[in-house]
Image (cartoon, rainbow, N blue to C red):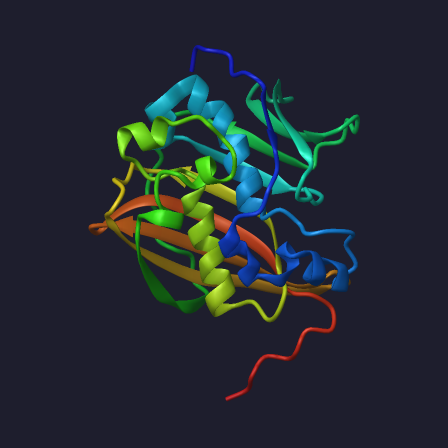
């Protein structure tokens, strides 16, 4: 990757579909102790991906990725700066900054556009697969609907990279979460691009569950395939039940 990435600025907002998780509404966020609606972590990720997409294009979309760390909430209406900096290991890291606060709300440590091997999901609690068509909220215009004017994915007819963790979130929401929940980390590897309109199959295993003061956490291994070919692999972590959430149903 030869070109240095550039700063991207945007006003953060929630997409309509995120109201499915009450934490992304003002009422639901306040009931959980937050001052206002949290912007979905995957939307923050979509903003962060503007930086490598604008610098490195389809090469990064095809075989890049990186490590997303959602450290503290971005709220709807925040003026977000996605600032690339060099990390201690020499890699580019995109920081999500708000106002005069020098502490990033999120970071995305970029992985170079180089092929990585496809490996099986780790053993764990298997979840029922999900099948979706890569269009509308799962298509090329995820970031455009969130206020990002960069049109590479739309112009090329390719699924936006934010769709991959969005599908991991969809798995969490439908198969694991109880009530409001919070996505906080993803390790994402791209293996191939996917055309808009294709059918994607999402497979996942829960490989760890822990309980902390902040709630119940789950780590998932997620594989996304199109026509039987792996397009993305994700290690995905979320607080799947906040304190006070109902206990899971027992068989």
In terms of depth relative to the viewer, which is nearer, 131 or 110? 131
In terms of depth relative to the viewer, which is nearer, 137 or 64? 137
Q: In which quarter of the image is residue 70?
A: top right
Left or right of residue 22: residue 33: right
Q: In which quarter of the image is residue 133?
A: bottom left
What's the residue at 59%, 42% (across, down)?
A: 13
- Residue 97 vs 164, above or below: the answer is above
> In this view, which residue lies farthest toward the bottom?
251
Image location (x, y in percent) of residue 76: 66, 44
| Res 115 seen here | no
What's the residue at 27%, 42% (across, down)?
A: 196
Image location (x, y in percent) of residue 2: 43, 10
> In this view, which residue lies farthest toward the left?
227
Left or right of residue 130: residue 79: right
What's the residue at 54%, 33% (across, down)?
A: 47
In terms of depth relative to the viewer, which is nearer, 26 or 169? 26
Image location (x, y in percent) of residue 122: 42, 57
Q: How many labels does the image show?
A: 0
Looking at the rendering, in which quadrant would you find the N terminus?
Answer: top left
């Amino acid at each position: 990757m030869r070109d240095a990435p550039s700063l991207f600025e945007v006003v953060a907002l929630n997409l309509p579909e995120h109201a499915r998780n009450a934490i992304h509404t003002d009422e639901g966020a306040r009931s959980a102790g937050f001052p206002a609606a949290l912007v979905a972590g995957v939307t923050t990720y979509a903003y962060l991906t503007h930086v490598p997409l604008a610098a490195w294009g389809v090469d990064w979309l095809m075989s890049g990725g990186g490590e997303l760390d959602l450290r503290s909430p971005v709220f709807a209406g925040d003026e977000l700066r996605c600032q690339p900096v060099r990390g201690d290991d020499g890699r580019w890291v995109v920081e999500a900054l708000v106002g005069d606060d020098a502490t990033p709300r999120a970071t995305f440590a970029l992985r170079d556009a180089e092929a990585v091997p496809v490996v099986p999901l780790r053993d764990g609690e298997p979840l029922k697969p999900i099948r979706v068509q890569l269009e509308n909220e799962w298509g090329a215009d995820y970031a455009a609907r969130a206020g990002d004017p960069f049109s590479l994915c739309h112009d090329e007819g390719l699924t936006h990279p934010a769709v991959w963790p969005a599908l991991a979130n969809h798995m969490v929401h439908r198969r694991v979460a109880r009530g409001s929940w919070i996505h906080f980390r993803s390790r994402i590897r791209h293996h191939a691009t996917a055309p808009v309109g294709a059918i994607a199959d999402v497979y996942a295993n829960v490989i760890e569950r822990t309980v902390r003061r902040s709630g119940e956490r789950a780590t998932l291994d997620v594989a996304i395939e199109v026509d039987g070919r792996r397009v993305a692999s994700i290690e995905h972590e979320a607080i799947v039940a906040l304190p006070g959430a109902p206990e899971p149903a027992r068989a």
